[in-house]
C-alpha cells in the first residue's frame, strides 16, 4: 500500500512542501509565538518532509535560544513549518497549512508552552 503524501505551503504558493505518512499526534501550544501564529503542530522526521521551494527563498525568524528556526514566506508572511527547539532534527509542520485536512477530525493534544521547560521534562519519555 502506498503511503499518503500531503502537500502544504503558504497562502501565495511561494513556499511549498510535501510530507509523507499519516497525520498523527497534532498538538496546540499556548506559548507566545504559537498563540500569535495560531499554529497546530505536527512534528515529523526530516525524511518525511520534502521542501519543494529553494531554502534560499524562505525568511527565518529566531528568538530566545536561537535553536528553533521559524521559517515563513517573505511575500505573504505565512509560517507553514519550522525546525523545533525540542527536536532540531525534525520538522514541525503547521497542519493549518496542509491541503485538504479536516481540522475538526483531528485529535488535538494541548501542550503548556508557557511553562516550556517543565512541560518538556514531563513529556520526555527517557
Image (spheres, rainbow, N blue to C red):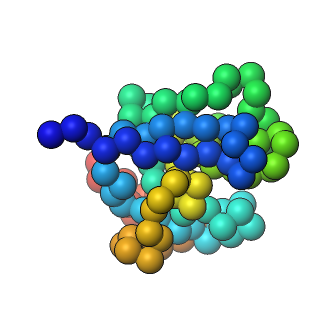
Q: Where, by quadrant of the figure, is residue 54 drawn?
A: top right
Q: Does the image show residue 64?
A: no
37 w.r.t. 30: above or below: above
Position of residue 63 measured from the top left corner of the image (x, y, whole percent): 77, 45
Position of residue 61 measured from the top left corner of the image (x, y, whole percent): 78, 42
- Count of all numbered marks drawn on residues in the image: 0
Quarter of the figure that contains the N terminus: top left
Q: Where, by quadrant of the figure, is residue 15 drawn?
A: top right
17 w.r.t. 100: above or below: above
79 w.r.t. 66: above or below: below
Asked if residue 9 lies left or right of residue 118, the reply is right
Nearest the eye: 93 or 112: 93
Nearest the eye: 50 or 119: 50
Q: Does the image show residue 121?
A: yes
Query: Furthest residue to the left?
Result: 1
Position of residue 81 measured from the top left corner of the image (x, y, whole percent): 60, 45
Asked if residue 34 lies left or right of residue 5, the reply is right
Asked if residue 47 lies left or right of residue 10, the reply is left
Position of residue 70 measured from the top left corner of the image (x, y, whole percent): 69, 43
Query: Furthest residue to the bottom?
Result: 104
Q: Where, by quadrant of the figure, is residue 14 drawn?
A: top right
Residue at 36% across, 60% down = 25
Residue at 69% across, 42% down = 13
Amino acid at each position: 500500500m502506498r503511503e499518503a503524501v500531503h502537500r502544504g505551503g503558504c497562502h501565495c504558493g511561494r513556499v511549498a512542501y510535501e510530507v509523507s505518512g499519516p497525520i498523527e499526534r497534532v498538538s496546540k501550544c499556548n506559548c507566545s509565538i504559537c498563540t500569535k501564529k495560531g499554529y497546530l503542530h505536527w512534528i515529523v522526521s526530516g525524511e518525511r518532509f520534502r521542501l519543494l521551494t529553494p531554502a534560499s527563498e524562505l525568511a527565518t525568524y529566531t528568538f530566545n535560544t536561537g535553536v528553533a528556526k521559524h521559517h515563513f514566506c517573505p511575500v505573504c508572511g505565512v509560517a507553514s513549518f519550522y525546525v523545533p527547539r525540542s527536536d532540531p532534527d525534525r520538522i514541525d509542520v503547521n497542519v493549518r497549512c496542509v491541503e485538504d485536512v479536516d481540522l475538526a477530525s483531528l485529535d488535538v493534544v494541548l501542550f503548556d508552552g508557557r511553562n516550556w521547560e517543565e512541560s518538556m521534562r514531563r513529556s520526555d519519555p527517557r
